């Protein structure tokens, strides 16, 4: 049914709510991924008319969905979820994708107690998650 479009978002860093965990986690990311940037991916499935049908918050078996977790959850779990497009709040036809945890897990809805900033201007680059990983490697 329709097409699947990969959306990969690159964040400059992650900031756990505890200073010491932040330092340890930063070292882990540098050693394991050779970068400090956080890369998260989800997909939009469209129908045969190119209208969005659903968002799939998962990539290679790893969830990118926040569920009901709060921003300051110390060790946020990566959930997988497929969300029908009609569940999203939209500005015209553009859905709001909320980031609800410090490690950038996504949702179609806001979690209480979090202030949000709407990003209207952002860079879009043609590529995929593999290319994003290569582009942001430190070495």
Image: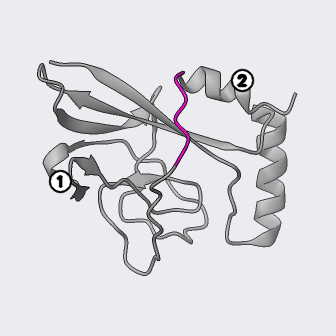
Q: Residues within 10 Å of mark 2 (few under 14, many from 20)?
A: few
Q: Left or right: 74 with respect to 86?
A: right
Is the residue 78 above or below the residue 99 in the image? above
Stretch of the chain drawn in magenta: 122-127
Prevailing secondary structure of the magenta residues: loop
- Magenta stretch: residue 77 in it? no
Tell how many labels: 2
Q: Identify which residue is drawn at 82% across, 56% down.
A: 24
Q: Quadrant of the C terminus?
A: top right
Q: Give the farthest residue toward the right.
A: 139
User: Which residue is rendered at x = 61% and y = 21% of the image?
Assistant: 130
Q: Position of residue 94 (x, y in %)?
A: 28, 48
Separation (CA) of disc 1 from disc 2: 34 Å
Q: Going by the image, does 126 lie left or right of 28?
A: left
**The one of 75 and 104 positioned closer to us in this rendering:** 104
Q: Position of residue 62 (x, y in %)?
A: 48, 35
The numbered mark, 1 or 2, whose residue comes first in the sequence reads 1
Residue 87 is marked as: 1
Res. 83 image quadrant: top left
Picture layout, residue 94 above or below residue 115: above
Residue drawn at the location 78% of the way across and 34% of the way down: 32
Question: x, y percentage for residue 97?
Answer: 37, 53
Q: Which mark is residue 134?
A: 2
């Amino acid at each position: 049914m329709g097409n699947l479009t990969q959306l990969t978002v690159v964040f400059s860093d992650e900031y756990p709510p505890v200073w010491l965990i932040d330092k340890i986690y930063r070292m882990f990311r540098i050693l394991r991924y050779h970068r400090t940037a956080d890369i998260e991916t989800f997909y939009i499935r469209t129908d045969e008319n190119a209208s969005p049908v659903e968002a799939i918050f998962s990539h290679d078996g790893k969830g990118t969905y926040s569920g009901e977790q709060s921003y300051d959850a110390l060790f946020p779990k990566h959930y997988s979820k497929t969300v029908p497009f009609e569940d999203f709040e939209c500005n015209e036809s553009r859905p709001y994708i909320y980031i609800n945890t410090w490690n950038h897990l996504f949702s179609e809805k806001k979690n209480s107690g979090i202030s949000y900033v709407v990003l209207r201007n952002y860079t879009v680059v043609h590529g995929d998650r593999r290319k994003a990983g290569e582009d942001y490697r430190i070495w």
